[in-house]
Image: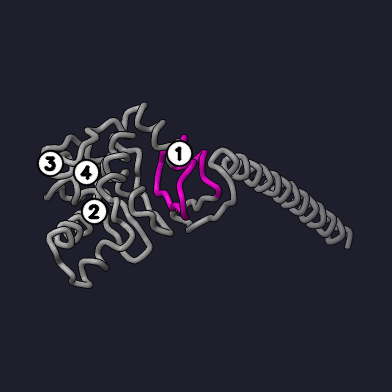
Amino acid sequence: LEPTAWQVRVSGSVHMVHQRLSTAGTVADLLGIAPARRALAAIEAGSVDQADFDAVGDDWDVDARAVAELAALGLDADPGFLERDASTLSGGEATRIALAGARLARSEITLLDEPTNNLDTHMRRWLYDALDGWDGALIVVSHDRDLLERVDALVDLDPRGAVSFGGTFSQYREHRATLQSAAERRLRDADAELDRAKRQAQAELQRQAQRDRSA
């Protein structure tokens, strides 16, 4: 699938970035920080509603953190950019902003679905470096072999089911090659044993035929 943008959705302590999200709203919406920013604006205007304080949580510096993350990605590093209409973003910009939102969420578990799609070489390197220092657990759905060289464990899905392996993609390929070689060796041994059994059976039939003729 070729994603046109990314969707950021926060559910409890799990942060998920999905393909095929609508870029309706602002950059702040795409980052997932719009509710906290609205609550901050209400508090600054004099609100004492507990719901606003709950919405802010520990994100009193959310604008500064968002600007810093965007600057690290080579995007405009000023608060005004957060109000930009997300529909005016290019696919690459939307992807980078959604990834920045994943970092800002500070969730215990982050799920990235094909995160390197639509990223150029420079941005892929940035993503690899960012994932190397990621806080919390990270689950990645990807066909990017370079990215899969940076995982601690993987799950391979195919029509036969799911196979779990504790290691990188290249280590998994070596493991599969070893298993395949062992399976082929067992198959050759089984074929050889079958041939021996057939020859023995044929020899016994011939001896029985000779005994019958003698009788």
Q: Give the CA separation, mark 1 to mark 2.
A: 27 Å
Q: Secondary structure at mark 2?
A: loop
Residue 144 image offset from top left, x and y in percent: 42, 38
Q: Is residue 161 left or right of residue 96?
A: right
Q: Which residues are magenta?
A: 131-152
Residues marked 3 and 4 touching at CB (< 8 Å): no
- Mark nearest the camera among 1 and 3 is 3
Q: Is residue 84 left or right of residue 103?
A: left
Residue 65 image offset from top left, x and y in percent: 31, 45
Q: Mark 2 or mark 3: which comes first in sequence?
A: 2
Q: Secondary structure at mark 3?
A: loop
Q: Nearer the viewer, residue 174 or 130?
A: 130
Residues marked 1 and 2 touching at CB (< 8 Å): no
Please identify the quarter of the rendering in which residue 143 is found.
Answer: top left
Is residue 108 visible in this depiction of the protein?
yes
Q: Could you classify mark 1 by the number of other residues whose Cα lies within 10 Å: few (under 14), some (14-19), or many (20 or more)?
A: many
What residue does disc 4 label? 5
Q: Mark 1 or mark 2: which comes first in sequence?
A: 2
Amino acid type, callout 4: Ala
What residue does disc 3 label? 84
Q: Could you classify mark 4 by the number of other residues whose Cα lies within 10 Å: few (under 14), some (14-19), or many (20 or more)?
A: many
Amino acid type, callout 3: Arg
Residues marked 4 and 2 touching at CB (< 8 Å): no
Q: Nearer the viewer, residue 41 or 19?
A: 41
Is residue 1 visible in this depiction of the protein?
no
Q: Give the CA separation, mark 4 to mark 2.
A: 17 Å
What residue does disc 2 label? 33
Q: Give the CA separation, mark 1 to mark 3.
A: 31 Å
Quadrant location, the C terminus? bottom right
Q: Could you classify mark 3 by the number of other residues whose Cα lies within 10 Å: few (under 14), some (14-19), or many (20 or more)?
A: some
What residue does disc 1 label? 147
Q: Give the CA separation, mark 1 to mark 4.
A: 20 Å
